[in-house]
Image (tube, helix red, strand yellow):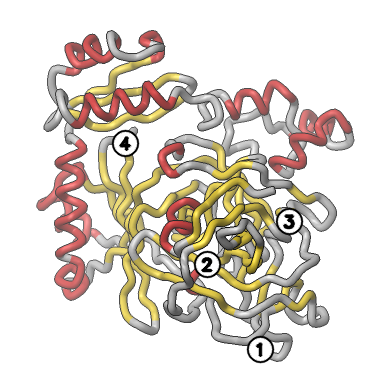
């Protein structure tokens, strides 16, 4: 975990922090003992402190005045790095007159514009079947703004593959050997009538399974939603997990498969796997605690829900999976296309968030969060590449016809 955030990690120093109660707030948030200075360093460029207005100004300028040259932006070390293919200094000078913190803008010179990279991503998507027939099965396509390229996952990266892609797309494409997988599950259910919901976490990070006698496949619970009627009266309590986890069983259980029956939950409510969403809602009985389990005794409350536009490359993000446990890292990107083979054929998931930590089957449905902030629902993993993908919580709520509002 310390390695992800470039923090000091020699054994003597880490041991000196382990039993100091002053670092309990950091333990609750990151499942690790961190000093106040280290937490501040992690948060320095996070979505909690970033100037949203300046980011919107940069993107609007880039897509209009800088169109055809704009290569995107990324936040690093508290600086907003803005890329242009041509006339970079002139564009940066113009931008500095329009933002509130001009001293925080830095320029990087790009070979490819965002429009060029987006066109290549579209071409790769349209060519997916043809490329597979040639032996090049794409598993994901991910924007890498800092490196000014697309990271493209292939089931097998051979010399022939490198030559083929280099001849067609040059340095705009970087090949990564990786499969992408998740635990097979069900498909879409009829969508419920639209309601309002407050979202918080409920026993998140614990395994859920369809019945004690079912084969030992499991997923992880994430966040809860309360559905209320026009009179603001609650009539349904639900919890999020991954859409591909869905089984049409009358009851699910929470706990650990093989160690008793666990707590009886409810059945399936609605799920969707496709577009930009891999998420499901399951029915939840009364009396289930609204927390994410960090360890068997530490539970993290969730008090805020992230807006979709607030995700930024480099932001801190953690997940708490029933299989892997808690892992914290940084957000790699927000627009990954993930291709997964299912029993119903190939599915493409758009706008998946990617983090630089590996999750495992069974972690599907895990809550992705940063401290008290709900960020998303873990969907899939590119193990060889060391990437975990998740669906943003706001996208999932919208797709499942839930108005995501602050939970109580």
Closer to the chain start, of discs 1 and 4, is 4
Q: How many marks?
A: 4
Q: Residue at x 53, y 77 (%)?
A: 246
> Which circle, 2 or 4, is nearer the viewer?
2
Residue placed under numbered mark 4 in the picture: 145
Q: Quadrant of the N terminus?
A: top right
> Which circle, 4 or 3, is nearer the viewer?
3
Q: Is residue 330 visible?
A: yes
Q: Residue at x 18, y 68 (%)?
A: 131
Structural crowding at the residue carrying mark 3, measured as other residues with C-alpha within 10 Å and reported as few (<14), some (14–19) or many (≥20):
many
Residue 56 coordinates in the image, percent (x, y):
33, 28
Task: Tell me whether the residue at label 1 lies in contact with that at label 2, contact meaning CB atoms closer than 8 angstroms.
Answer: no
Q: Residue at x 33, y 71 (%)?
A: 347
Disc 4 and disc 3: Cα gap in Å? 37 Å
Residue placed under numbered mark 3 in the picture: 290
Element under disc 2: loop
Structural crowding at the residue carrying mark 1, measured as other residues with C-alpha within 10 Å and reported as few (<14), some (14–19) or many (≥20):
few
């Amino acid at each position: 975990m310390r390695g992800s955030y470039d923090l000091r990690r020699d054994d003597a120093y880490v041991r000196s922090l382990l039993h100091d109660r002053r670092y309990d707030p950091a333990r609750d948030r990151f499942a690790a003992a961190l000093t106040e200075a280290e937490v501040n360093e992690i948060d320095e460029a996070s979505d909690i402190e970033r100037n949203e207005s300046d980011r919107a100004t940069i993107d609007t300028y880039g897509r209009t005045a800088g169109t055809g040259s704009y290569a995107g932006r990324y936040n690093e070390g508290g600086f907003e790095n803005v890329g242009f293919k041509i006339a970079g200094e002139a564009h940066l000078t113009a931008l500095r007159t329009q933002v509130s913190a001009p001293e925080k803008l830095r320029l990087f010179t790009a070979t490819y514009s965002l429009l060029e990279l987006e066109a290549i991503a579209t071409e790769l998507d349209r060519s997916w079947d043809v490329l597979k027939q040639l032996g090049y099965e794409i598993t994901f396509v991910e924007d890498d703004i800092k490196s000014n390229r697309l990271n493209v996952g292939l089931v097998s990266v051979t010399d022939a593959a490198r030559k083929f892609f280099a001849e067609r797309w040059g340095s705009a494409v970087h090949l990564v050997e990786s499969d992408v997988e998740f635990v097979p599950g069900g498909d879409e259910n009829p969508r419920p009538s639209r309601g309002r919901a407050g979202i918080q976490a409920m026993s998140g990070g614990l395994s859920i399974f369809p019945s004690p006698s079912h084969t030992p496949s499991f997923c992880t619970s994430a966040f809860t939603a309360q559905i209320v009627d026009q009179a603001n009266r609650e009539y349904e309590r639900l919890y999020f997990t991954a859409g591909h986890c869905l089984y049409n069983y009358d009851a699910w259980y929470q706990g650990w498969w093989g160690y008793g029956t666990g707590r009886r939950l409810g059945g399936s409510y609605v799920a969707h796997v496709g577009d930009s969403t891999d998420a499901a809602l399951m029915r939840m009985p009364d009396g289930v605690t609204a927390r994410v389990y960090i360890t068997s005794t530490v539970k993290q409350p969730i008090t805020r829900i992230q807006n979709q536009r607030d995700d930024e490359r480099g932001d801190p993000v953690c997940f708490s999976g029933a299989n892997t446990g808690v892992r914290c890292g940084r957000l790699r990107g927000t627009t990954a296309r993930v291709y997964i083979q299912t029993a119903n054929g190939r599915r493409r998931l758009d706008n998946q968030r990617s983090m630089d930590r590996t999750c495992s089957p069974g972690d599907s449905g895990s809550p992705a969060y940063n401290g008290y902030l709900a960020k998303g629902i873990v969907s899939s993993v590119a193990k060889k590449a060391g990437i975990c993908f998740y669906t943003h919580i706001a996208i999932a709520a919208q797709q499942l016809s839930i108005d995501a509002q602050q939970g109580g």
